[in-house]
Image: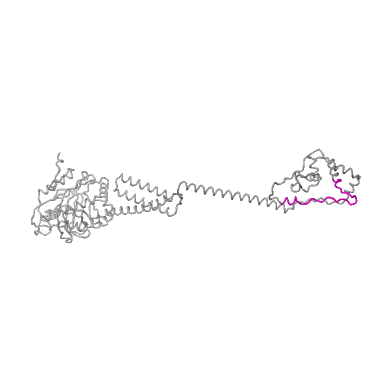
Amino acid sequence: MANNDWDLDDLLNFNYDREVPEKKSDFDILDQFEKKPEPEKPKTGKGLGDDFSVYDELKQYEALRHKEPKSSPDFGTPKHSAPQRSHASYEASSSASSDVLPPLSSQRERRFEQTGFDRDIFEKYEKMPKKAPVVEEIPSGHIDEIADAVSQRGAKEIEAIKQASHEAYERYRSNYVKGKKKRSGKKGWHVTKFHRFLTTVYLIAAAVFAASMIYMNVLPFNLSLILYGVLALVSLFIFVQTRRDGAGKWGKRTATFLAIVLIGVYGVGTVYALDTLSFLSGTSVNNEKAVSDLTRKPFNVVMTGIDVDGTIGEEGRSDVNMVVTVNPSTNQILMTSIPRDYEIYMAEFDNAMDKLTHTGFYGVGTTIAAEEQLLDITANYYVKVNFTTVERFIDAIGGVDVESEYEFTPVKLKEWTVQEGMNHMNGKQALAFARERKAFPTGDNQRIKNQQAVFEALIRKATSSRTMILNYNKVLSGLRDYFEMSFSSREIRRLVKMQIAHDPDWHIYKNTIVGGDGSLPTYSTGGAYAYVMTQDEESIENAKTLINAVLEGQPLQTDDDGKVTVSAEAGE
């Protein structure tokens, strides 16, 4: 049907309810039904010699004139059956929509009048066999097909919309994450089992290390506060970087490296602390003469060196005898040496006389009692060593620098020559230097001076915190079986803490008791005569004066001849 060529037939067949799709769609099946040919009209009667189109038109027109209008058109008719609607249905719908009959065209009216047929022609026309108008309906299967098509299209469109929405969200999320990484400049990492394990081990190691250091109590408060504060910050950094999703690559790597290094440091520190406690507990003995606070109050220490090798349990002659008086308030240290052959009296043997060196056969208690009686002092502590102790200790701290007044070759080490002036000595060399007496005109007196020189070098090297820290474990392992003292573990740790906190500049003074030469019957020889250095009362009284001055906090001084005296400022 042309859009611009309208005639009466077109008007009669036009369906006002029809909705013509603007473009092809999934409803193409409807177009196939609409394109089917309309039913054939009755052919022209051969006997009449004319067609019945004019009568057909007239009949329709008359029917329209006498038809009662309906109240409303029938909108229930399916749209797809509109092309096959009959003229009567159209008349009913048309009359309902308008009261004015469409006029016949003048051409057709004239044609009707010119026929001249009577009314019988209508009867003949009605009696003629006519084909029933074919009104095709859409089969139910086709209707289901249309419904399925519509349903499938809807489902596909919904699925497509969901898929498109999901893809759009993923693109948005991906772009957002990439943009965030680009802005932060970091690559997000996830927490792994390794990092969980690492931080767990780290926390345990840090806790054990902190507990051992607190129990050791060798660090001053300020230093402890700084140390624990730094470790807390580092631990927080390690924990955050290794246990947080999305942490930066370099931050996580740095935290992992620090955790591994600090676990090693914590382990070594804990081992050192436990070794220290074990060493001090194993070398300390009960002491009833200890002072209440040796970091504030002065005290006396008896140093005795036994002339044997091996463990400290071996008894021998006491070749080295020294009383060390310490005043931590004035930072003064006085070393008072007593010659090994000096005349002493042993109270536990009915005040029998003997040489000081022989007291070593009877135990360190006998030696201490003899020196206390000689100098009228209280020995608050003692330290017992032997040849092996000295040699191992000096080797552990890397040797000592000792100044010698003479050039000589020790009898105990003939392959080595001591130079006049400063000499760096290892353990074996320092021991040979301290034992030599035959190479000097003054014999034992010079040997005592050399022993004092070695001991002074030991004190200066040992009070260097750097040296002790670097060689700490070696020192402990080298002295465990060759060292005995009456300092408690707590007292030693307090001395170390004081040294670290204040790093005092110790003033060291050296004094030696002198005597005369004699031959006297001794207790250890069974009454037989032996060489004995007899007591010199003036020298002994001078030693007592110097010891009491240090204990009382009076300053000492050394004159040009090397003699130690009480400073003149003490009397003012």
Q: Which residues are magenta?
A: 29-56
Instruction: Say whether residue 214 is left or right of residue 445.
Output: right
Q: How is the image coloured?
A: one colour
Q: Residue furthest top?
A: 99
Residue 160 part of the magenta segment: no
Measured as percent of width and height from the top left, residue 467 is found at 26, 52
Rendered view: 232 above or below 526: above
> Residue 241, how many percent across, how many down?
42, 49
Depth check, front residue: 532 or 500: 500
Image location (x, y in percent) of residue 313: 21, 58
Count up the numbered dots.
0
Give how far across and how far down residue 213 sits, in percent. Answer: 32, 49
> Dominant secondary structure of the magenta stretch?
loop
Image position of 389 with respect to 295: above or below: below
Reply yes or no: does residue 53 show up in magenta.
yes
Q: Quadrant of the C terminus?
A: top left
Query: Is 137 displayed left or right of 465 in the figure?
Result: right
Please tell me in which quadrant of the rendered image residue 553 appears: top left
Q: Is 560 rendered above or below residue 311?
A: above
